[in-house]
Image (cartoon, rainbow, N blue to C red):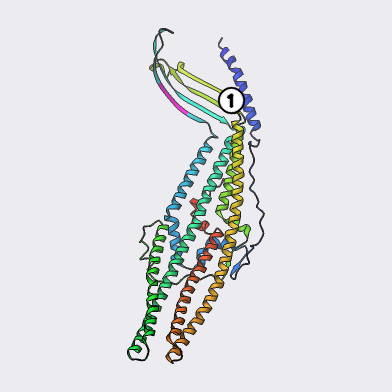
Amino acid sequence: MQKQPAKRLRPLYLILLGLLSVTVGLGGCTAVGPDYTQPEPEITGHWHTELPSGLTADSRGSVQTDNWWRVFNDPQLEALLRRSVQGNLDLKKAKARIQEARAVRGIAEADFFPSLDGVATATRSRSSANSSTGTERSLFAVGFDSAWELDIFGGVQRSLEAAQAELDAIEADAHSLVVSLAAEVALNYVEYRTNQTRLALSQGNISALTQSYELNRSRYRAGLISELPVQESLRLLESSKALVPTLESALGATKNRLAILLGEQPGQLHQELADIKALPRLPASVAVGIPAETLRHRPDIRSAERRLAAQSARVGVATADLYPRFRLTGSLGLEALNAGELFETASRRWSFGPGIQWKIFSAGAVRRHIDVQNARQEQALIQYEQSILSALEEVENALVAYGKEQQRRAALAGAVSVGERTSVLAQDQYQAGLVNFTTVLDAQRSLLALQDELVRSDGNALAQLIRLYKALGGGWQSALSADDQPTRQ
């Protein structure tokens, strides 16, 4: 009689052994759903735009773009960029999203392991006197409950793949934000230095125009000229003065914008940027690489590709619902009607056994869910292809803009040189009585406009180069610390 319980348990052991054999046999099989393979876009090996002077397409492109701000040789710009990476609030939010995604991935990974719960209960109950004995009793129990889902068809594996790919995508989003942040800081810095140079130029011109006005007024009082040259020189002087408040307002707004980008309060950079400094100089040579390097370099393209991988894995998660789920459950503990007898040997209890769950009928909901995930995968693929086209367009446009601005700057530099000579000749001829003051006024007005436009073109050329570096996806590798690099498995 003592061996009968063991005989009754023997079929259960056989079922368990059979289930474990199936698990081991299927363990080497591929998980259900598509196995992801990164698409290989077909792109040309060169840029469509003819590279302007100073730009080269060679293998140094990706290396140079990693630290592109160093080509300007401006320590203050580099310091501002470092502070922006540490203090920018949008980047801090992006880092918090990375931590969230890492936690989500940890949750998905935990599904590979069994769960174990500790249980302790104490209950008092009374049965019905009309249906039973009507007695009261107490029940005390302590123990452990465990469950483990065997990932035979790879649903958990696909969930982990999706979580990892989503983590990679969110990290790439943070890298893309760094690219934009570095470019935004540099563009605002260049705009500030441009307006600062324009203001200094304007103030110098105001000083020269003031002397011209005073000279004309003296000559008028002496009866040497009429009042018209005096009023015309005064008009030019006052119109030049009108530009100063506009430039000063722009300088204040740019400093405030830079402070916000650095995660600081407006006004905190006013003293730091008070000194007048020249605009950074354009580098003699810039290596832009080739299209394939740009696609590997840009974090927004990696983000789109990783989201495509995540969606591919979600198709496998949905497909796994077509198949049964196998679970191993167990319970071990102590149970007694009297608290004093709870820890006696006779109070031991245990249970162990396999389980299976299978969605036999769901009115097509499982297959419709697979269709949903397949459609989303197709959308993700289209988004990936669109990201590639947008990236190539951005680089091509930046190449054109940078080249044309250099041509414009060269023409303006020539025009300023001619304008300076014209102004001198007009002044000499006016003093000699060969021309009226209107000729001098026109020459001065044209020269002032050309000088201001040349300074703006200098700033625009720098800005276009910064936008080119942004389009090439440069800066995030050097700006982020090792703790913020993508998680590798």
Q: Is residue 311 above or below residue 199?
A: above
What residue sits right under mark 1 in the picture?
A: 356
Residue 485 visible in this rendered orientation of the protein: no
| Chief secondary structure of the magenta portion | strand
Position of residue 331 measured from the top left corner of the image (x, y, whole percent): 50, 23
Mark 1, secondary structure of its residue: strand
Instruction: Please say whether residue 338 is one of the residues in the magenta stretch.
Output: no
Q: Quadrant of the N terminus?
A: top right
Mark 1: which amino acid? Ile
Q: Is residue 239 above or below residue 119?
A: below
Residue 159 visible in this rendered orientation of the protein: yes
Mark 1, other Cα within 10 Å: few <14 / some 14–19 / many ≥20: few
Q: Residue at x 54, y 44 (%)?
A: 166
Q: Quadrant of residue 31?
A: top right
Left/right placement of residue 164 relative to residue 256 reads right
Left/right placement of residue 108 relative to residue 17 reads left
Q: Residue at x 57, y 51 (%)?
A: 302
Q: Residue at x 56, y 66 (%)?
A: 401
Instruction: Please say whether residue 119 is one of the residues in the magenta stretch.
Output: yes
Nearest the viewer among 299 and 433 is 433
Q: Magenta segment range?
A: 117-121
